[in-house]
Image: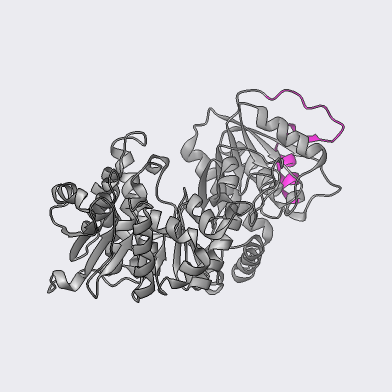
Amino acid sequence: MKIFSAQQIRHCDQQTIREEGITSTDLMERAAKACLHWITNHYDRGKSFLVICGMGNNGGDGLALTRLLIEEGYHASALVLKHKEAFSGDASKNLKRLHQITPQRVSILNESDELNGISTQFILIDALFGTGINRPVTGWVSDFINIMNTLPHEKIAIDMPSGLPADTLPAAGAAIFSVHHTLSFQLMKRSLLHPEGAAFSGSVSILDIGLSASFIAQNPSQYQITDLSVLKFLYRPRKDFSHKGTYGTATLIGGSYGMMGAVALATLAALRSGAGKVKALAPHCGYTTLQTLCPEALFQKGGDTFIEKMEVEAGTTVGIGPGLGLNPLTKRALSLFLKQATQPLVLDADALNIIAESPEEMLMQIPAGSLLTPHPGEFKRLFGTAANTMECVEAGRNQAMRLNSTIVLKGHHTTVLLPDGSCFYNVTGNAGMAKGGSGDVLTGLLTGLMAQGYSATDAAVIGVWLHGKAGDLAAGKASMETITAQDICAHLGEAFHALLG
């Protein structure tokens, strides 16, 4: 699914109106009906709603929804904030339609008016401002939003929580309507995918309102959400007449005394990725652990209690970092390996921390087409600080282009940043995966996919989705509190099934 800017969405609205020969009021009615459909699927007729409307098009959506709720048998009222001189054309039309049907259900709130108590029976619907807002809310409307945020009522936002911009992240302390559910139209808005915006939006539902399919297909966007249409295009089915050599060799380099579990988890994940052969290059102190937990994998000694040398056979795909440690001899071994490496690598964890000690020198030694998987702390050490998570993603896009490699910036919505500047947001996964070992599973999975011939870009898009999906499946069977990295690994098979539909 593409992510469009607020301006692109406005243009998409306009093309839809032209193509279908409808009016903007008709499109507003369509959006209101989509919201009504969501509400009827979630709330019975005994619920009451107070729709808080602005004077622009988002307010028009709210006024149309109020009328539809009443016609559907719900108790609903509209509270309109008179925050400017005139209504937009479509909002004015919907205000008149609602007033003609049931004038007693419409109230106007002026700046000088006292806000009476709002009954606790109401579910509040925020229809003040939509995607058109491009500056912070100020004045008495800001105070109103802050008062609403103190109320214990269940809250729903239409399209966007009021005050939250679609394309950027809010300034600290900005007045933003905080809701439990956001009903956004047709396409995801980028700010909803970042923690600074998601803190206000609650659960997000994307409602199809039939916007122009030709416009969406023909207009490019650097930003997308990874969905099944993307995955099925990238996925390579296994061939019937194939053998283990067909699917390559993955070598995981890592482990040190006390941290053998990390490379073991990576090895397990590589075994479940589809790779033909998997090898663990690790210290001898981990031999028994690896041969016991991963009997299908080969073992290669790289030292006694930590990695002292990294020697791999030609043609293997290498993932480096899980449990590697920061011993000076390990650092030296990685430096020598990078200077000689010609094939794309997967780099994670302590491999990235070692590179971060001499970033200008070592980053440029990474072979083109490689895959880096930093979490936010590792990203900061590699590339510096950013003001917020969206700026961090933009910095990562620039670095991916500079290094001609793919960067997987891990987080709740992990972003896959490609060398051509594209950004894929992943929406599988859950908070239960925020545990030690989860990243090691991802490293092994990505290495195993690349061993089979997937490019770093394709492996990252597919692998991050599979990793998150496996975590979702594991949490669905147990709980977010109890799932472990081994559970994620164990559910990769079901995640592959989900990918295939």
Left or right of 397 on screen, residue 141 = right
Q: Is residue 46 above or below residue 84?
A: above
Give the x, y percent position of residue 273.
Answer: 25, 59
- Residue drawn at x 60%, y 71% is 19
Which of 201 and 432 lies nearest the eye of the viewer?
432
Regarding residue 110, the answer to whether it shows in the image is yes
Which of 386 and 112 lies nearest the eye of the viewer?
386
Which of 162 and 209 lies nearest the eye of the viewer?
162
Q: Quadrant of the C terminus?
A: bottom left
> Which colour scheme appears in the figure?
one colour
Whether residue 11 appears in magenta in the rendering, the answer is: no
Q: Is residue 229 above or below residue 324?
A: below
- In the rendered image, the residue lying farthest to the front is 328
Left or right of 282 on screen, residue 394 = right
Give the x, y percent position of residue 136.
Answer: 75, 47
Regarding residue 103, the answer to whether it shows in the image is no
Residue stretch rendered in magenta on the structure = 93-118
Give the x, y percent position of residue 471.
Answer: 34, 46
Number of residue marks: 0
Give the x, y percent position of residue 168.
Answer: 65, 55
- Residue drawn at x 85%, y 35% is 111
Left or right of 35 on screen, residue 412 = left
Left or right of 226 on screen, residue 156 = right
Which of 94 and 9 lies nearest the eye of the viewer?
9
- Residue drawn at x 35%, y 68% is 345
**Res 442 quadrant in image:** bottom left
**Res 355 quadrant in image:** bottom left
